[in-house]
Image: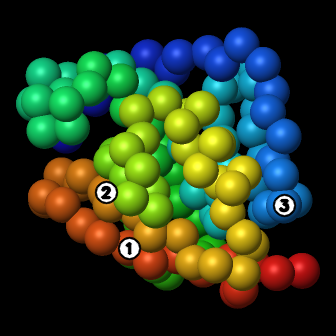
Amino acid sequence: MKLALMPRRERKTGSTGCLGSRVSYDEQKATLNLLGMTLTEVVLDEERSGKLGSRTGVVVLVVDAARDAYLGGVRNGDVVAEVNSVKITRLQDLKRVLQEQDPHDPIFMFLLAGTGWRFVNLSFIGSLP
């Protein structure tokens, strides 16, 4: 998979809303941590840009194999196309969807991986303190 990994910096730190400590945003690194995965905003290559209809995207940098995201099917390098039926092209899009999310409701993610499209259903229930 060819991704031009050029993180785009967010200008301000947003609130995590009702999700509390399960979601954290690092403004200096321009990353978002969620359910054991670290996501960042990148400029996509031509192939993925064509499939997603956007020059920018949110990619999964790292997934902790012992956490919810990995167990749900998310893998390193996946590009987030949609979350809860909302198109995601920037970290700000993802943060907005998560802020509106009830922590007891599942998160539905549509991902573009090196092998094709994948749908995953993630739940916060396993991550509750």
Q: CA distance from mark 3 to mark 2?
A: 24 Å
For the residue labelled by badge 1, is the local secondary structure a helix, a strand or a loop? strand
On screen, residue 113 above or below 74: above
The local crowd at label 2, few if under 14, some if 14 to 19, many if 20 or more residues have their Cα within 10 Å, is many
Q: Disc 2 marks which amino acid?
A: Leu
The kind of residue tagged 1 is: Val
- First along the sequence among labels 3 and 2: 3
Position above or below: 100 against 66: above
What label sits on residue 18 in the rendered view?
3
Identify the disc placed on residue 111: 2
Residue behind mark 1: 120
Q: Position of residue 17 (x, y in %)?
A: 83, 52
Q: Residue at x 44, y 17 (%)?
A: 6
Left or right of residue 37: residue 125: right
Taking the spot 59% from the left edge, 50% from the top edge, the residue there is 97
Mark 3: secondary structure:
helix
Task: Give the mark nearer the N terminus: 3 vs 1.
Answer: 3
Q: Is residue 76 visible?
A: no
- In the rendered image, which quarter is residue 30 located in? top right
Mark 3 nearby-residue class (10 Å; few <14, some 14–19, many ≥20): some
**59 horizontally vs 67: left or right:** left
Indicate which label's residue lies in the foreground, 3 or 2.
3
Q: Amino acid at mark 3?
A: Cys
